[in-house]
Amino acid sequence: MSHTDRLNGRQVSRRDFLNIATVGTGAVLAIGLTASPAYAKVPQKVVNYQPIPKGKQSCSTCGLFVPQTSCKLVDGTVAPQGWCTLYQPKA
């Protein structure tokens, strides 16, 4: 059987399959490690961000808040005493 026959899918040896799988897995991992994050942060206006709390809810008590002035999902600077519609109490 010629090399061309194996590439056309007629018969693939175990060794060829493992080589292809190894190279393919490596390529996928390399792309995943160099790619940008899968999501972008949401603009403050979209989530109705306000620099004051809503009752007892504030960024500093939200599970998404990243001290000192950041959020995992909201773009830009957020105040610890701020609030938005994505508020999730810390677990």
Image (cartoon, rainbow, N blue to C red):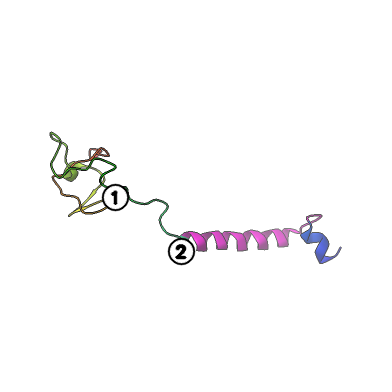
Q: Residues within 10 Å of mark 2 (few under 14, many from 20)?
A: few
- Residue holding disc 1: 72
Q: Position of residue 24 (x, y in %)?
A: 61, 60
In front here: 43 or 80? 43
For image coordinates 29% across by 48% down, the residue present is 43
The amino acid at mark 1 is Lys
The amino acid at mark 2 is Thr
> Residue 34's mark?
2
Query: For this view, does 46 lie left or right of residue 9?
Result: left
In front here: 62 or 17? 62
Q: Position of residue 10 (x, y in %)?
A: 81, 54
Q: Give the extent of the magenta segment.
A: 9-32
* Image quadrant in which you'd find residue 3: bottom right
Label 1 or label 2, whichever comes before in sequence order: 2
For image coordinates 67% across by 63% down, the residue present is 19
For image coordinates 76% across by 59% down, the residue present is 13
Q: What secondary structure is marked by label 2? A: helix
Query: What residue occupies the far right of the structure in this picture?
Result: 1
In front here: 80 or 40? 40
* Image quadrant in which you'd find residue 63: top left
Q: Is residue 40 above or below residue 6?
A: above
* Image quadrant in which you'd find residue 85: top left
Q: What secondary structure is marked by label 1? A: loop
